[in-house]
Amino acid sequence: MRQRLERRTRDELGISMVQLGALFYLVGSDGCLHKDLADALGIQPAAVSGLVDRMAAAGLVQRRTCTDDGRAQRLHVTAAGKRVASQARPAVAEMQAALVAGFSDAEIAIIARFLAAAVERELWPSSSTPGKGSS
């Protein structure tokens, strides 16, 4: 499913799923710090640098020096980035509808609770590989 979604975003929007997630976050949190974006995406702060480099090169985001801390940069979504995010919303809604089709609201609530617990309990920490003996 992940590969299918990745292929669709690349074919239809010309960006990766991670870039799309970043755009969705930035549209709602324009001017955030790199760390904020890393936290929102669940990736290491070092990985955000390359992600933002690619997105800036594509004209989707801009970096601006933080007025509070000259060493930090704030991330701002560009008009082009907003257009891509807007174009993606109907496809995302369509995929979400297909994903939940045939499930009751109660079943979806249980699935959401299960996934939230998995994230909260860090069952798959990024520093280890699932099934490699980490508990």
Image: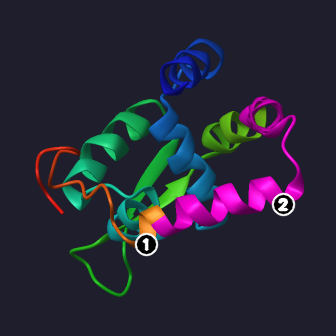
114 inside magenta stretch:
yes
Rendered residue at 74%/34% (across/down)? 99
State the residue at coordinates (41%, 40%). 56
User: Which image quarter holds the N terminus?
Assistant: top right
Number of other residues with Cα within 10 Å of mark 2, as a class: few under 14, some 14 to 19, many 20 or more = few
What type is the residue that disc 2 sits on? Ala
- Which region of the structure is painted magenta? 88-117
Q: Which mark is residue 10?
A: none
Q: Amino acid at mark 1?
A: Glu
Query: Label 2, on which residue?
Result: 106
Could you say whether the residue bearing mark 1 is in a helix, strand or loop? helix
Pinpoint residue 32: horizontal percent, then vertical percent: 47, 70
- Disc 1: CA contacts within 10 A as few (<14), some (14-19) or many (>=20): few
Query: SS at mark 2?
Result: helix
Cα gap from disc 2 to disc 1, whole angstroms: 21 Å
Between disc 2 and disc 1, the foreground one is 2
Quadrant where the image shows the C terminus: bottom left
Q: Quadrant of residue 71?
A: bottom left
Q: Which residue is mark 1?
A: 120
How far across and down, in percent of the image, does residue 102 sit?
A: 87, 35
- Secondary structure mostly seen in magenta is helix
Q: Earlier in the sequence, mark 2 or mark 1?
A: 2
Q: Nearer the viewer, residue 48 or 104?
A: 104
| Nearest to the observer: residue 60 or residue 7 | 7
Instruction: Report the front residue among 128 and 82.
Output: 128
Q: Is residue 52 above or below residue 5?
A: below
Q: Position of residue 38 (x, y in %)?
A: 36, 61
Whether pointer 2 and pointer 1 mark residues with C-beta atoms closer than 8 Å, the reply is: no
Residue visible at 57% across and 61% down in the picture: 114
